[in-house]
Amino acid sequence: MAKSLLLKKGRIGSMELKNRVVMAPMGTTADGDGGYSARTIRYFEERAKGGTGLIITGRNASVLEFEGYSCSALSKYHHVNRLAALADRVHAYGCKLCVQIGPGLGRIMYTSATVPPYSCSPIPTFWFPDMKCKELTVDDIKFITDKVGYSAKLAKDAGADAIEMHAYGSYLADQFMTEAFNHRTDQYGGSLENRVRFLGECIESVQKYCGKDFPQIIKFTPVHCLDVPGYRKLEEGVEIAKLLEKWGAHALHVDTGCYEVWYRQIPTVYQKEGCQLFAAEAVKKAVSIPVITQGKLNRPEYAEKVLEDGTADFIALGHQHIADPLFVQKVKEKRFEDIRPCIGCNECLRLGHLGRNYSCSVNPVVHHEDDFPLTPAKPGQSVLIIGGGPGGMQAAITAAERGMRAELWEKTDKLGGMLLAAGAPDFKKDVLTYVEYLKVQLGKSGVPVVFNKDATAKEIAEAGFDRVIIATGAEANVPNIPGVENTVEAIPVLLQECPIGDECVIIGGGVVGVETALFLDGLGKKVTVLVRSKLKYAEEAVNNVQCMNDMLKASGVKVIEGAVPVRFTENAVVYSCGGAEVTVHSDTTVLATGYHPLNALADELEELDVECDVIGNAVKARKIINATGEAYMAVRRM
């Protein structure tokens, strides 16, 4: 049987790789001076241990004179020691290390409303559109390109096997190449060749400091996926790819999108697998050097086909490596069902933007590889889990890993809890993939599951477990509005467990309300969303919000803001807006008005002197990351 192409050796310039799987660059935490932290080194080591062929680090700022570092810095010699430690850890597992070098952020830099960043031209900043960037002089450009080469030398001195130029997705190098941003009239503006010159000189600088044979990967964006004049179309992107090959690039890492449509750059749960392949395919046809592709290629069978079809030479997985560092090892062992799937929730990105370590909804120990180990349980130690949602299943799986006697009671005949409804729309099927993963792991754990068990506190106490974990979830809020009995809650609608008419009104404009509206729109329904103030996606990543808003714009869903429901009838909703009452026809009125926790059992058990932990939505209606993280920690600390 032929060897999997994913596991076949590959080459980028003089660098030989043991397989075709690349850990894509993502932001990482650093120490106070910008050098790699011990935590980050362990995080990367775990991914190398999992079998990945090449790890590309997150952006390392080469120049701090024009900006602060956003992730890590590689501008001074004292950064080398910790980078060398990272290289040694990665190399110990036969993995190669590629250090991403960043010439700058430009208009994307999050500074303040009073301190403008630098860019190719005095263009508006992204975060503060009323503030314009300072224009880099030619001397500034020469300074930056020299510093890029010096940073590459530091990476090489530290033992890195290659560097990747950070030249994509609306950052500084991309701004130089983009007609909408670059208004210069000197040798760095005007024609496409001039606009690419800044990046080309960065490549030359690396060659000067490291030699022409030192592998250079250029990550760039051939298409911005934004239909606005001056933003890049694919045809121009292909021409840039040809120019980069002439400048001496050894491989091209193809990205798509820009900050205005960030979900085209960093995909969300709402997008289909392979969403960036079209760009890689176009570039691959135009150049002779290897092409690295990315964009929801998490399914090994699908990634394998991408290589078989010749669409690209290497598969880059970003968030999937956060979700499961053992991806390659499991592929090698053909344990596809054991691969913990990324669900595209982008909690990792959101928390990183808050200055925290990258965390993960499905992997409770990411960036805590040494902090929260699971130790063997005491002989005979036992735990009873009430509730079979993501928190309950994670608790049971973790208990089995510790060697505990565990049991899970679920009041329905299905596992998955609210995720069954959350993953019901076709545009969120990644969530159901995660549910299936948990069910498989729970089955392999040997933990007994008792279905249709609506437990009482007395029954739980009499079961005699050392500890109880309450993972009973939440239920819908029902507003005190006349005629509310004529409404239905969003979950049965998403599960199609109730009749759904042709004209639907959604009450509530949060994530659940909008996703339900899009789901019904996809079924061909006429949908209206009533929102008391404005659409509000609480604590969602920026790219998720952008994607939902664009999906709404492309749909037939009507959103009415400032609409306060007054009463519901069998076939209508009466609401107040601007002081006037309005009536809208509704065959099905759907409540998406939030949830409250179901945790009465905890108080009853406390009265019976039974020790218990309450986790997930049973504490407060929140997210998957809360349920799984709290489940893991509740079992770990027993």
Image (spheres, rainbow, N blue to C red):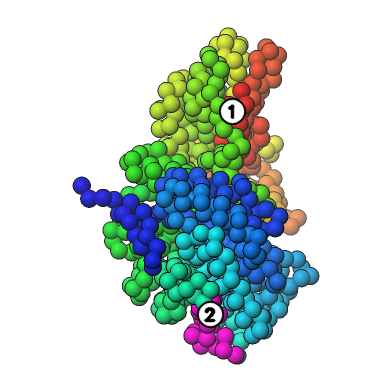
Residue 466 is a magenta residue: no
Say what amino acid the circle numbered 1 marks: Arg
Q: Nearer the viewer, mark 1 or mark 2?
A: 2
Tag shown at residue 636: 1
**Is 627 placed left or right of 284 in the picture?**
right
Residue shown at 68% from the left, 13% from the top: 609
For residue 106, say whether it is visible: yes
* Above or below for 580 versus 106: above
- Residue 298 is situated, as x and y percent measured from the top left of the image, at 41, 50
Q: Name the foreground residue: 300 vs 7.
A: 7
Name which of mark 1 and mark 2 comes first in the sequence: 2
Residue shown at 33% from the left, 56% from the top: 9
Q: Name the foreground residue: 589 vs 266.
A: 266
* Above or below for 344 versus 364: below
- What is the magenta range? 186-205
Element under disc 2:
helix
Tag shown at residue 201: 2
Say what amino acid the circle numbered 2 marks: Glu
Q: Which quadrant holds the C terminus?
A: top right
- Residue 494 is situated, as x and y percent measured from the top left of the image, at 49, 42
- Residue 511 is situated, as x and y percent measured from the top left of the image, at 59, 48
Residue shown at 61% from the left, 56% from the top: 81
For residue 585, say whether it is visible: no
Q: Name the foreground residue: 288 vs 131.
A: 288
